[in-house]
């Protein structure tokens, strides 16, 4: 996979916060210098994205077969015939969204189809018909083993809602819709299978074994499913939860409003005893509105988050916020900034930002937490300022992460292997954030394999943690053209301590859309 040319398309599509730079990006895409080793896929050993292998694996990991008790059902959408609350939960979210829209935009219509100002996702696509969920990728997330060490982290099967071609379509091919469904499995189940005796080290070894494999298509799929394969434990009894992300509304640019798309995010835990998926809170998705309106809850949240032990976990990116502070559904907007609950769930929670009367945190609160951490000998890697604290709180949430260096509201749409000529070399299956994090994930797999204690810490969503590797140097993922950066002050002492290391490679300069934030992107000097 080309790390510069092919990912240029991702960067252009995902630049929601820097629209004025799109034209220069397009002009420069064809003139990027080649880098040694740029054809080496970053996801090697950490993800299965080969479209031809996924075509074969889609049969083995058919969504109906995993979720339904009767795998031979004719229903293409697996939730319809199950006693699950998913459809009702989605419908409820739609109704709440429509009600809010009508209250906020009384003069703009909302409904399904191009005749409306705000075009809703057609929920009819979720019922049996000519659509189904197609396997788009299999992702190793053993880097999340800090959530449950006994389970060795997670393995995720990502499905994309797709219209399957039928005779009535004539020559029209399948059409993919803006919705993904992730089935999250425990990498190792609570009850190890008889005789398997699988350890985290063995599971990691199996994944890393394919790192240098040249297999593709059916040969790769067969290897992945062979005896003692890395997909051995990806089965229903090890299912942990299902996650959905769908584009709930699309609003083309008009005389009355700018271009906008909103994404609905929901999570459903799997109850193995009942076989049901139950609505659950989104991990670390803080309930901003409730915190700003409930002083007692806000006080408890502040005390909990600023406790030195939790503050250190926030800095490392391994924090797990208690459920009482979380919400069970969220809307993320693209371009970011339409809704405070979009890219910036923490917006208004820190004094001095938007005039909020009762902010949760004051500047002195954060400064005090930084001092307390230092006094306890805690070495902070990311949060070294008020701005660093707010950015960290934002990108720890589902919405904040998905709206940072994403492809619209997604991090992994996958390659459409049902297309006539699917190819990873011409279509980028994932976002810059996804690819920028692969070196860290592979480092964690190697630690598991070698019997070492993994370092689960991670950098900001905007800027990956390098961990001493030079693999990302000069690319858009770290300091190359298109990377996120920080405009340095003339006096180094005035630079924000959280971002002063976000520099650009030689020959590039950091340009910020908003001079006040000084966060920008790396471009060719003097262009």
Image (cartoon, helix red, strand yellow):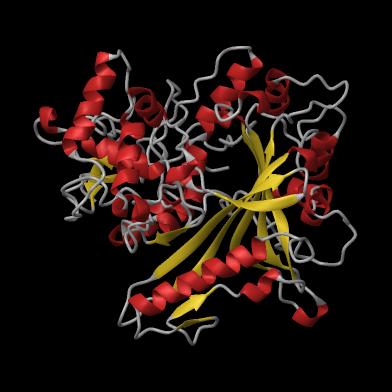
Instruction: Choose between 306 and 500: the one closer to the eye.
Output: 306
Residue at image coords 78%, 33%: 233
Q: Position of residue 346 (x, y in %)?
A: 32, 48
**79 and 76: which is toward the camera:** 79
Side of 152 relative to 405 (left or right): right
Give the left or right position of residue 90, taking residue 31 as reference. Answer: right
Residue at image coords 35%, 56%: 289
Q: Nearer the viewer, residue 121 or 296?
A: 296
- The x and y percentages for residue 344 are 33, 51
Q: Is residue 257 left or right of residue 490?
A: right
Quadrant of the rendered image containing residue 442: top right
At a point 54% along the width and 23% down the height, the residue shown is 443
Rendered-image quadrant of the N terminus: top right
Vertical position of residue 470 compared to residue 122: above or below: above
Is 358 left, or right, of 483 in this rendering?
left
The answer to which of 112 and 513 lies nearer the viewer is: 112
Q: Does 377 appear above or below 161?
A: above
The percent coordinates of residue 3 (x first, y second) are 50, 41
Looking at the rendered structure, the number of numbered marks drawn on it comes to 0
Inspect this view and state whether residue 339 appears: yes
Q: Residue furthest left?
A: 491
Residue 235 seen in this snapshot: no
């Amino acid at each position: 996979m080309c790390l510069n040319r092919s990912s240029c398309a991702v960067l252009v599509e995902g630049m929601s916060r820097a629209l004025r730079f799109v034209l220069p990006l397009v002009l420069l895409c064809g003139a990027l210098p080649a880098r040694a080793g740029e054809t080496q896929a970053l996801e090697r050993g950490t993800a299965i994205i080969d479209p031809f292998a996924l075509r074969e694996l889609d049969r083995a990991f058919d969504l109906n077969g995993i979720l339904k008790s009767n795998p031979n059902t004719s229903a293409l959408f697996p939730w319809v015939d199950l006693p699950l609350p998913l459809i009702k939960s989605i419908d409820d979210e739609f109704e709440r969204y429509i009600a809010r829209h009508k209250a906020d935009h009384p003069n703009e219509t909302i409904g399904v189809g191009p005749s409306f100002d705000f075009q809703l996702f057609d929920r009819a696509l979720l019922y049996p018909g000519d659509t189904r969920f197609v396997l788009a990728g299999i992702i190793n997330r053993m880097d999340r083993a800090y959530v449950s060490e006994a389970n060795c982290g997670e393995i995720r099967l990502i499905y994309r809602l797709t219209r399957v071609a039928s005779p009535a379509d004539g020559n029209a091919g399948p059409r993919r819709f803006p919705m993904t469904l992730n089935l999250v499995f425990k990498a190792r189940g609570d009850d190890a299978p008889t005789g398997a005796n699988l350890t985290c080290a063995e599971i990691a070894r199996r994944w890393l074994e394919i790192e240098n494999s040249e297999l593709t298509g059916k040969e790769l799929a067969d290897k992945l499913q062979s005896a003692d394969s890395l997909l051995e434990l990806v089965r229903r009894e090890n299912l942990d939860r299902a996650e959905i992300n769908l584009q709930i509304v699309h609003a083309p640019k008009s005389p009355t409003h700018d271009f906008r798309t909103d994404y609905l995010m929901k999570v459903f835990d799997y109850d193995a005893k009942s076989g049901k998926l139950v609505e659950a809170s989104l991990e670390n998705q803080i309930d901003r509105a409730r915190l700003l309106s409930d002083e007692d809850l806000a006080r408890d949240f502040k005390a909990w988050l600023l406790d030195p032990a939790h503050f250190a976990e926030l800095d490392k990116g391994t924090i797990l916020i208690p459920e009482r502070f979380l919400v069970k559904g969220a809307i993320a907007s693209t371009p970011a900034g339409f809704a405070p609950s979009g890219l910036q769930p923490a917006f208004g929670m820190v004094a001095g930002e938007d005039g909020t009367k009762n902010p949760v945190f004051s500047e002195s609160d954060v400064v005090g937490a930084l001092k307390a951490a230092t006094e306890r000998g805690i070495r902070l890697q990311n949060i070294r300022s008020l701005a660093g604290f707010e950015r960290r709180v934002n990108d720890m949430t589902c919405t904040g992460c998905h709206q940072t260096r994403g492809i619209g509201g997604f991090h992994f749409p996958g390659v459409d292997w049902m297309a006539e000529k699917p190819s990873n070399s011409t279509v980028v299956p994932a976002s810059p954030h996804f690819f920028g994090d692969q070196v860290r994930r592979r480092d964690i797999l190697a630690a598991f394999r070698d019997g070492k204690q993994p370092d689960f810490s991670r950098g900001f969503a905007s800027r990956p943690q390098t961990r001493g590797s030079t693999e990302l140097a000069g690319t858009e993922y770290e300091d190359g053209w298109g990377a996120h950066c920080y405009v340095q002050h003339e006096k180094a002492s005035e630079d924000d301590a959280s971002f002063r290391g976000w520099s650009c490679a030689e020959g590039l300069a950091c340009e910020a859309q908003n001079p006040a934030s000084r966060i920008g992107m790396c471009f060719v000097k003097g262009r």
